[in-house]
Amino acid sequence: MSEVVYDKQRLKRARIAVAAVFCVHGSVAGSFATRVPWIQDHADVSAGMLGLALAFPAIGASVAMPLASRISHRFGARNALRGLLVMWTLALVLPSLAPNLPMLCLALFVYGATSGMSDVAMNALGVETETRMRKSIMSGLHGMWSVGALIGSAAGTVAAHLGSDARLHHVLAAATLTALGLVACQGVLDLQPEPEEEAPPRFSLPPRSALLIGAVGFCAVFAEGASLDWSAVYLRDVLDTSPGVAAASTTGFTLTMAIARLVGDAVVNRFGAVRTVRAGGVLATLGGLLVVLASHPVMAMGGFALMGLGIAVVVPLAFAAAGHSGPNPSQAIAGVATITYTSSLIAPSAIGALAEATSLVTSFGLVTLLACGLTIFAGVLRTSGRKAAQAAPADAAAHGPRS
């Protein structure tokens, strides 16, 4: 009996620890995003060249994420996460030090590469913790990432308002987040590969299951990127609203996403991943229709809020499904993460190109169609629940005391 209680307590602590890791990871992203104008001025680059440079984090992440599985196998899950998270928090300093465009691109490539590898490692550990707890926790973990991003961006906003040098700000933020990350990593599961387990390849194509799951994630992230970057522009240009009202639409979208992720696990545990995503797809599609048909700003703002509510849990559930879909969770998660990062990279520019050729209303018609795809293809996430149910008892017996 004491061993069972200990295992439950250990898993609870591991869940809290990995949630803290997600929060730290999000705080780095939030800290960086608020100082982009300062970085642009310091590197003396135009808006167009800044857009080019900001593609390099996604490029770096896509290139490096497949390495995370190999690193976790070589050093163990906890040590790998500890090292990769420290690399990510320290990489926050690099962009603000870049004096010109080439160095900024290089700094952002490293920044993205460390972000992607630590992202895969922490999601893999989140999936392993979820498997042992036998209930959904991934939505809440991604909700904690959003909380961290809000904390980092709030601190960055204060620093920018005070006119502080981003180099000093990011050095202090990196030092603080590195210390917090190291403390958080102490509590995550210490999983080691089995002696007979073969090391994953350094680079490989993701398994077919990850491609299908990634396609669902692609739809959600495309809608997220389009809404985050273009919702304010949509209200301003299509519905002729004030800048303040236009900005509020983006805030509403972000807020509903964060809230939905924090409470999403209860819904998933009650109804399952497939039905949750299907229902989310319906909400997101209705939100997209409200946006496209809006004749008043309130209607469009409600549409964007509904879209955020509908797509919020899709990416966490896609990562969970990928982790449960095969023998190598990190490799499958890396495949899904690469697809979703690609979606986040192309969505804003694709919306802009289509709007230039047609209109913003037509662009969000495309977003609505992709949101509808969530309802149609949600069945590929069924792997998550099946594998979790099968793996949990055996894994708890085999790995409980060691973790």
Image (tube, rainbow, N blue to C red):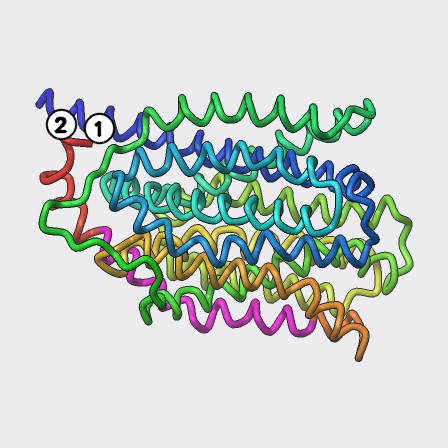
Q: For the C terminus, give its image quadrant.
A: top left
Nearer to us in this view, 275 or 357: 357
Which residue is at a point 48% across and 63% down the rendered structure image? 339
Secondary structure character of the magenta stretch overall: helix
Which image quarter: residue 292? bottom right
Nearer to us in this view, 59 or 326: 59
The reply, left or right, for residue 137 in relation to residue 165 is left
Q: Was residue 337 drawn as part of the magenta stretch in this picture?
A: no
Q: Was residue 376 drawn as part of the magenta stretch in this picture?
A: yes
The reply, left or right, for residue 65 in relation to residue 347 is left
Which residue is at a point 50% across and 36% down the rendered structure image? 144
SS at mark 1 in the image: helix
SS at mark 2 in the image: helix
| Amino acid type, label 1 | Lys
Q: Residue under label 1, please give it.
A: 8
Tell me the tag on residue 4.
Answer: 2
- Report x, y in % for residue 82: 38, 32
Q: Which residues are magenta?
A: 365-388
Nearer to us in this view, 121 or 149: 121
Which residue is at a point 73% across and 36% down the rendered structure image? 35
Spatial distance from mark 2 to mark 1, Cα to Cα? 6 Å
- Report x, y in % for residue 37: 79, 41
The reply, left or right, for residue 107 in relation to residue 19 is right
Nearer to us in this view, 69 or 243: 69
Extreme bottom residue here?
357
- Depicted 115 relative to depicted 231: above or below: above
Tell me the tag on residue 212.
Answer: none
Which image quarter: residue 371? bottom right
